[in-house]
């Protein structure tokens, strides 16, 4: 029995020894594996510690930049009014000519008011009589033949009759519609002899002075649009543009539309008709020295957009704050300065502090091994493509 257990123990020991011997590598195999591991690590790191990556760069420049918003606008006259009647009656006179130029104070329309004129003459006669009574009462009071109360009554009667005269004169003045300012009258809506009521429109009048525009801007731009802001107007029927300057804004934002009303004066109003629709480009921000780089140089990142600057033949990352885009350029508010060299083509393939070589310099550099490319052979596709391109150019 003891011999049986002894043989079993020997067999188990032999099996364990074989397994452990296979699991532990020999010294020669470890030495052979180390160079392969190092070589794999170097190849896996790409540009860092390995061969330089060919890239294209550009210099950061400053350029004038304007940020604009486009809104719809309408052309308005400097002054405009609808001339309406303030008195009901028959149109007795209509001397205006449609489309004619009138001066301030010219008669546009007169309503028949003979009854009011008669009442005015009567009231003036009564007022003159009351004035005489007041004078006689003062004379009697000086001779102590009238009381102070009599004089006060006479003066009150005179004042009341004078007020009646003023009221009738005001009503008679309403029978005549005069031009409130010099300008151009429009088409008339009534004819002589027609009966009109209070508020009937006779015609329109617009001044011939400088024109202006009115538009509405979204509330998020309300603080940026101020008096003096420049506006460029374009017209759908022509390619001509006209400049305008903001002179006033509403003091508050419209609650229903959430927009701010803006008015601007036109610098050149030649052949422009009030009421015309135009497109207004409002400059809300302008800078003469804005840092601009190609949009392809900006690399998106979890921590924010960044660019790679070439410093001592290495790609050094710089996180930037971008502004507005204009065509294929983007504004850099912070993170890059004028004169810096940033990577454009190939920026998305770089890693921080990777060695780089400018693509033009790599193509011009002489090959040491007889090949036409200065870029060493590697496993990545970009190196192979540049080598083939250099051989083809040779």
Image (cartoon, rainbow, N blue to C red):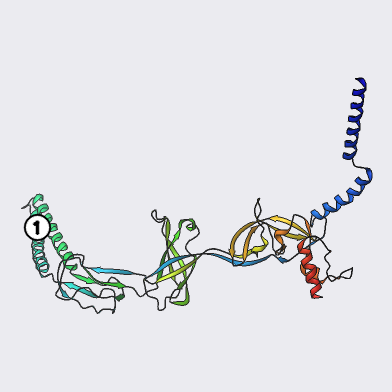
Q: Quadrant of residue 285?
A: bottom right
Location of residue 152 in the rendering, given as x and y in whole percent from the top left corner: 12, 52
Q: Identify the image quadrant of residue 189.
A: bottom left
Q: Using the image as rendered, state which of residue 197 and residue 325 is in the foreground.
A: 325
- Badge 1: residue crowd in 10 Å (few <14, some 14–19, many ≥20): some
Task: Check the picture and name the quadrant holding the N terminus.
Answer: top right
Q: Is residue 57 left or right of residue 226?
A: right
The image shows residue 138 at horizontal and vertical percentages of 10, 56
Q: Quadrant of the C terminus?
A: bottom right
Residue drawn at the location 14% of the way across and 57% of the way down? 159
For disc 1, the marked residue is: 139
**Residue 38 drawn at (x, y percent):** 86, 51
Q: How many marks?
A: 1
Q: Residue furthest right?
A: 28
Viewer-nearest residue: 343 or 369: 369
Which residue ends up furthest to the top in the rendered image? 1
The vertical placement of 295 against 35, above or below, is below
Q: Position of residue 258 (x, y in %)?
A: 42, 55
Q: Nearer the viewer, residue 205 or 371?
A: 371
The answer to which image quadrant residue 98 occupies is bottom left
For the point 68% across and 62% down, the residue is 297
Q: Is residue 187 left or right of residue 35?
A: left
Q: Secondary structure at mark 1?
A: helix
Q: Residue at x 46, y 72 (%)?
A: 234
């Amino acid at each position: 029995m003891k011999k049986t257990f002894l043989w079993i123990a020997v067999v188990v020991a032999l099996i364990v020894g074989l397994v452990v011997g296979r699991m532990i590598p020999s010294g020669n195999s470890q030495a052979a594996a180390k160079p392969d591991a190092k070589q794999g690590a170097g190849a896996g790191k790409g540009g860092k510690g390995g061969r330089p990556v060919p890239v294209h760069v550009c210099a950061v420049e400053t350029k004038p930049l304007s940020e604009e918003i486009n809104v719809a606008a309408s052309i308005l006259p400097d002054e405009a009014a609808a001339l309406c009647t303030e008195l009901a009656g028959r149109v007795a006179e209509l001397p205006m000519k449609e489309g004619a130029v009138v001066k301030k104070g010219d008669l546009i329309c007169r309503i028949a008011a003979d009854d009011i004129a008669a009442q005015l003459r009567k009231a003036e006669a009564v007022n003159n009589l009351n004035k005489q009574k007041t004078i006689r009462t003062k004379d009697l009071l000086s001779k102590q033949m009238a009381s102070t109360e009599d004089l006060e009554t006479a003066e009150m009667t005179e004042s009341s009759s004078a007020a009646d005269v003023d009221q009738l004169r005001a009503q008679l003045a309403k029978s005549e519609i005069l031009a409130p300012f010099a300008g151009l009258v429009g088409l008339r809506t009534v004819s002589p002899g027609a009966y009109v009521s209070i508020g009937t429109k006779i015609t329109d009048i617009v001044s011939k002075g400088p024109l202006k525009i009115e538009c509405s801007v979204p509330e998020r731009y309300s603080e940026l649009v101020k008096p003096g802001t420049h506006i460029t107007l374009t017209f759908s029927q022509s390619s001509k543009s006209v400049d305008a300057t903001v002179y006033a804004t509403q003091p508050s934002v419209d609650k229903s539309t959430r927009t701010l009303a803006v008015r601007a004066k036109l610098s050149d109003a030649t052949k422009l008709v009030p009421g015309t629709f135009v497109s207004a480009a409002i400059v809300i921000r302008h800078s003469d020295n804005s840092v601009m780089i190609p949009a392809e140089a900006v690399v998106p990142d979890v921590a924010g957009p960044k660019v790679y600057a070439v410093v001592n033949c290495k790609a050094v990352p710089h996180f930037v704050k971008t502004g507005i885009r204009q065509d294929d350029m983007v504004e850099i508010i912070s993170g890059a300065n004028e004169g810096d060299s940033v990577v454009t083509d190939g920026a998305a393939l770089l890693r921080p502090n990777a060695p780089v070589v400018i693509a033009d310099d790599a193509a011009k550099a002489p090959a040491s091994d007889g090949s036409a490319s200065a870029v060493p052979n590697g496993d990545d596709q970009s190196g192979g493509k540049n080598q083939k391109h250099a051989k083809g150019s040779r």
